[in-house]
């Protein structure tokens, strides 16, 4: 019976922690107090009730490490990432961007590599008491955090997007901006496709993908790629189509292959979305 009561207290402490994390953005101080003063003691109490006071002496530090990593460090890493993206978008957005990407090149993916490195290194340091060269691991973690922060700082100005009035905007990390006006566009193509899932990874499923390709009159093309189907992206795509018609730019939707149509319909069925708007945009009869 003690075991079940302890598990219940632990689950209750997690529910309180999740609630505090959900309100972290508007009330960071209150949420932190709830995490440390209410949720953490309840979690430790639940572990003691589930096991014993002797186990608290033996494994108490491990329990605290699990709580701190899962409910403080891990959410904080993702929170900082999302907050940066939100702040960057709000600094750029003037309400007239149809499409937007936070990086003008593949260089932006380095931030995810730094993030993945932290998610790998911190658990190793936390949950491997027998690990040697702890100072080296600590140094690597600190250096990675500084590199990650520095990279985000220097790529603050880096983005690209499709603006209703200006056209295609691309700006690098140094703030050098290039603009392709809609008058320079020869045509806009919608190219359906699908991405095969990895056979070795059962969680990597085959999915419908598509691109919007802006072809410049000088032969240069700029692509915006979309994985899966989204109502928000579809609304923006319709907006882009209407703007193309207004600017007399040919808007060409390539016909789907049999396989592409199969995964297109599968995804619509799985998400239980109304088919007509998607059929209309992709010109399916």
Image (tube, rainbow, N blue to C red):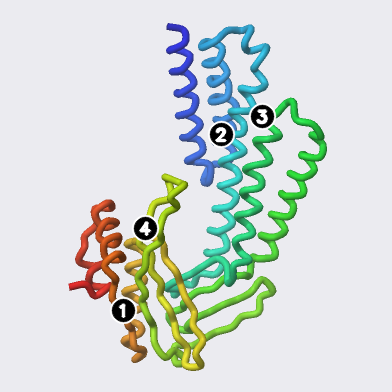
Residue of label 1: 253
User: In the drawing, what numbered circle is on residue 71?
Assistant: 2
Q: In terms of sequence position, does the residue under pointer 4 or pointer 3 come before the other? A: 3
Disc 2 vs disc 4: Cβ atoms closer than 8 Å? no
Quadrant housing residue 149: bottom right
Quadrant housing residue 214: bottom left
Disc 2 vs disc 3: Cβ atoms closer than 8 Å? no
Gap in Å between the C-alphas at discs 2 and 4? 32 Å
Gap in Å between the C-alphas at discs 2 and 1? 46 Å
Q: Nearer the viewer, mark 4 or mark 3?
A: 4
Q: Quadrant of the C terminus?
A: bottom left
Gap in Å between the C-alphas at discs 1 and 4? 19 Å
Disc 2 vs disc 1: Cβ atoms closer than 8 Å? no
Q: In terms of sequence position, does the residue under pointer 2 or pointer 4 come before the other? A: 2
Residue of label 3: 127
| Percent of width and height locating residue 232 | 35, 63
Gap in Å between the C-alphas at discs 1 and 3? 53 Å
Q: Nearer the viewer, mark 2 or mark 4?
A: 4
Residue of label 4: 207
Q: In terms of sequence position, does the residue under pointer 2 or pointer 1 come before the other? A: 2
Does residue 105 appear to the left or right of 242 in the view shown?
A: right
Q: In terms of sequence position, does the residue under pointer 2 or pointer 3 come before the other? A: 2
């Amino acid at each position: 019976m003690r075991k079940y009561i302890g598990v219940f207290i632990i689950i209750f402490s997690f529910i309180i922690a999740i609630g505090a994390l959900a309100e972290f953005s508007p009330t960071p101080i209150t949420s932190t107090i709830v995490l440390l003063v209410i949720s953490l003691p309840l979690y430790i109490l639940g572990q003691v009730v589930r096991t014993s006071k002797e186990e608290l002496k033996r494994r108490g530090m491990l329990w605290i490490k699990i709580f701190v990593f899962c409910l403080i460090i891990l959410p904080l890493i993702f929170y900082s990432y999302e907050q940066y993206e939100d702040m960057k978008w709000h600094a750029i957005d003037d309400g007239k961007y149809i499409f937007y990407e936070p990086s003008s090149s593949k260089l932006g993916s380095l931030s995810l590599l730094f993030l993945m490195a932290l998610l790998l290194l911190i658990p190793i340091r936390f949950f491997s008491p027998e690990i040697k060269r702890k100072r080296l691991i600590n140094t690597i973690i600190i250096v990675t955090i500084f590199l990650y922060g520095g990279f985000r700082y220097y790529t603050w100005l880096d983005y690209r997007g499709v603006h209703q009035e200006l056209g295609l905007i691309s700006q690098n990390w140094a703030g050098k901006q290039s603009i392709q006006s809609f008058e320079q566009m020869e045509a806009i193509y919608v190219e359906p496709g699908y991405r095969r899932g990895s056979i070795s990874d059962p969680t990597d499923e085959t999915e419908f993908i598509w691109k919007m390709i802006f072809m410049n009159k000088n032969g240069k093309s700029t692509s915006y790629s979309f994985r899966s189907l989204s109502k928000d992206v579809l609304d923006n795509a319709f907006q882009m189509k209407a703007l193309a018609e207004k600017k007399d730019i040919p808007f060409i939707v390539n016909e789907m292959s049999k396989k592409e149509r199969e995964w297109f319909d599968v995804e619509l069925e799985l998400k239980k979305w109304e088919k007509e708007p998607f059929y209309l945009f992709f010109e399916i009869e």
